[in-house]
Amino acid sequence: QQQVKQSPQSLIVQKGGISIINCAYENTAFDYFPWYQQFPGKGPALLIAIRPDVSEKKEGRFTISFNKSAKQFSLHIMDSQPGDSATYFCAAKTSGSRLTFGEGTQLTVNP
Amino acid sequence: KAGVTQTPRYLIKTRGQQVTLSCSPISGHRSVSWYQQTPGQGLQFLFEYFSETQRNKGNFPGRFSGRQFSNSRSEMNVSTLELGDSALYLCASSLGPSGSYNEQFFGPGTRLTVL
C-alpha cells in the first residue's frame, strides 16, 4: 500500500512537444506529492510538489495534475527542451512518514 | 550555502569486503536519509537519522548500517559486500525529520562497484 507506480519507464519527445509522466498510488493517507528531476552524475532535485487540496499546480513549463478520486497524479512538461532530458521521479508521503518514490522515467527530448 | 557533500564519489570493492560512505548535510540540517539507487529498483530507502537517532529503516539486511554524529554528519557502512550491492548511494538532508514537510536536498551520490 506504500507503493507508488510510475509510467512510462522511458519517454522520447520532440523539442517543443509535451512530455507527460503518470503516477498512481494506493495509500489514501498520502498528502504530499513531489516530483524530482535527476541529471546524470547528480542527485535528484525537487522540481515541483502538490497537496491533494488542489487539482493542479503550475510552475513555468511544469504542471502537476492531481486526481484524488482516481489516486493518480501526473507531470506535464510543456514546450519540452533538450535541457529537460533527465530522469524524473514522482514521490508521495504522509505527515508521519518518509518519501516513497516511483520507479523513475527517463525522458529524452530530441532537438 | 554549500550543498550536501558525499565522499568518496566513486568506490570499487570486492565481494566480502566492507565499505564506509560519508555524508555531510547542508549546514543547519539535522536530518539525513540514505537511499540506494539501481536501474532496476529505483530509489530504495535505507534509513534516516535525526539528531543522532535512527528514526526509520528500510527493508535492507543487517549488513547495512549507519550512524549520525553530533555535527549531523552521517556515515553508512555495508559489511560483507555482495555483487548486488553495486549501486549509487544517495544521501539527502533536511531541516527536520522525514515526518515533516521539509524539502530533502540530495547529494551527488557515491557510486559503489562490487567486483
Image (cartoon, rainbow, N blue to C red):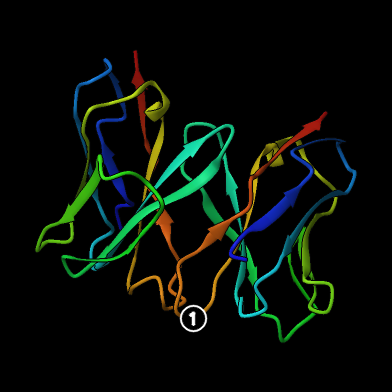
Q: Give the image location of residue B40, x and y in percent.
A: 59, 33
Q: In this view, does B64 lie to the left or right of B72?
A: right
In the image, farthest residue toward the bottom: A53
Q: From the image, which quarter does the C terminus of chain B lie in? A: top left
Query: Is residue B79 depicted above or below A79 in this figure?
Result: above
- Residues packed near mark 1 inside 10 Å, few (<14), some (14 to 19) or many (20 plus): some
Residue occupying the far left of the picture? B70
Task: Kindly identify the residue that appears in the image at 72 percent across and 51 percent down.
Answer: A6
- Tell me where residue A106 sits by quadrant: top right
Q: What residue type is labelled 1?
A: Ser
Location of residue B67 in the rendering, given as x and y in whole percent from the top left corner: 17, 54
Q: How many marks can you see? A: 1
Residue under the point 55% across and 71% down: A93
B50 vs B40, nearest the viewer:
B40
Q: Which chain carries label 1?
A: A
- Vertically, is A18 above or below B81? below
Q: Which residue is drawn at 42% across and 26% down?
A: B84
Closer to the camera, B11 or A81?
Answer: B11
Q: In terms of image quadrants, where is residue B30?
A: bottom left
Residue B72: image location, x then y, percent: 18, 61
Please tell me whether mark 1 sits on a helix, a strand or a loop: loop
Q: Tell me the residue that label 1 is attached to.
A: A95
Image quadrant in which the N terminus of chain B is located: bottom left
Left or right of B88 on screen, residue B43: right
Which residue occupies the foreground of this view, B55 or A108? B55
Q: Is residue B21 left or right of residue B35?
A: left
